[in-house]
Image (tube, helix red, strand yellow):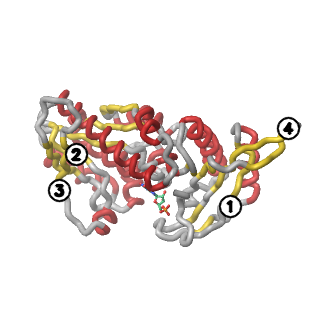
Amino acid sequence: DWTTGNVIEEQVAAIREQVGDKRAICGLSGGVDSAVAAALVQKAIGSQLTCVYVDHGLMRKGETEQVEKDFVAATGVQLKVVDAEERFLKALAGVSDPEEKRKIIGREFIRVFEQAQLEILQEEGPEVAFLVQGTLYPDIVESGGGTGTANIKSHHNVGGLPDDIEFELVEPLRQLFKDEVRMVGQELGLPEEIVQRQPFPGPGLGIRIVGEVNKERLDLLREADAIAREELTAAGLDRDIWQCPVVLLADVRSVGVQGDGRTYGHPIVLRPVSSEDAMTADWSRLPYDVLARISTRITNEVRDVNRVVLDVTSKPPGTIEWE
Ligand code: XMP
């Protein structure tokens, strides 16, 4: 019968069988799926696994540290962190168009990740033959089944490597739904903040700044987002809402008054939604006192923000994210 203990035992045996004495690489995104997949593979093959975390500089406050410190402490995993913030910000400079931003972030991410894979190959040798992915059962159903291999091309001038390297995929979550993945993660002793994390888009805060992305704006949004998350958690609302994007309208300014002076600052949008699967969503009817606390704190504590507004649009017609 189905218990998390049985799932872990079965998967550990299957991973050992598949990987043998070879080595594996796993990319960590900060999300639940890749974290649980990595923890399972770590349990199965220990130091034969190397994890890679690309820090694109678009994460929320504390999230990179969560991976670098808490995840490593909980699993003992061998982690390679690539600090690529500067590279991403440079590539995003001057870009406001949402699709353009997504394309740039996706492209840079693949390049940086492949570069890291090649470096690991160079350091650890040709036994590196497996790539771990946190594919879930619904992902497989949606994409029409199938598993297989992933190719990387050594177009990065590293030298001394074959032109085209093929990894075999390890997908230990293929039979699981999201709630089951969380249970397995909990059983494996992963930090609560990772296991219970709400959905967060791959392009990160890059698509929550309406307008150009730069370090100053990211820092500002990180502060506002951290306050909103803190207050929602303190109010015990994390399980009631699906997620709550916090968006900076970087190209909009409005007039305000603070202390004895006029201000001309940016609005922050709160976008709390309820949903079953993100395909449709409704705006969450959050308690007014919680909204009031978030608004007061953001306008008091975040420089250059003088207004907090609430998004009361369902999906459709609005999407959950603003970009
Ligand atoms: P939308 O904005 O389309 O979002 O209503 C639906 C869900 O998907 C998340 N989302 C993404 N997740 N990469 C991701 O991994 C992305 O590019 C991306 N865009 C949106 C969003 O946070 C919501 O949960």
In the rendered view, does 293 fall on the left or right side of 103?
right
Residue 220 image point, x, y percent: 62, 39
Give the mark toward the camera: 2 or 4: 4
| Amino acid type of the residue tagged 4 in the rendering | Gly
Q: Gap in Å between the C-alphas at discs 2 and 4?
A: 57 Å
Label 2 vs 4, first from the N-terminus: 2
Q: Gap in Å between the C-alphas at discs 4 and 3?
A: 62 Å
Q: Disc 4 designates what residue? A: 261
Q: Is residue 175 above or below residue 248?
A: below
Q: Tag 2's secondary structure? A: strand
Q: Is residue 294 above or below residue 311?
A: above
Q: Is residue 73 visible?
A: no
Q: Gap in Å between the C-alphas at discs 1 and 3?
A: 44 Å
Q: Residues within 10 Å of mark 1 (few under 14, many from 20)?
A: some
Q: Tag 1's secondary structure? A: loop
Q: Disc 2 designates what residue? A: 131
- The residue at label 4 has a CB less than 8 Å from ligand 1: no
Q: Gap in Å between the C-alphas at discs 1 and 4?
A: 31 Å
Label 4 vs 3, first from the N-terminus: 3
| Amino acid type of the residue tagged 2 in the rendering | Leu
At 34% across and 46% down in the image, what residue appears? 107
Q: Disc 3 designates what residue? A: 148
In the rendered view, does 314 fall on the left or right side of 43?
right
Q: Can you tell which mark lies on residue 162?
A: none
Give the mark toward the camera: 1 or 4: 4
Q: Tag 3's secondary structure? A: loop
Q: Residues within 10 Å of mark 2 (few under 14, many from 20)?
A: many
**Pointer 2 and pointer 4: residues touching (CB < 8 Å)?**
no
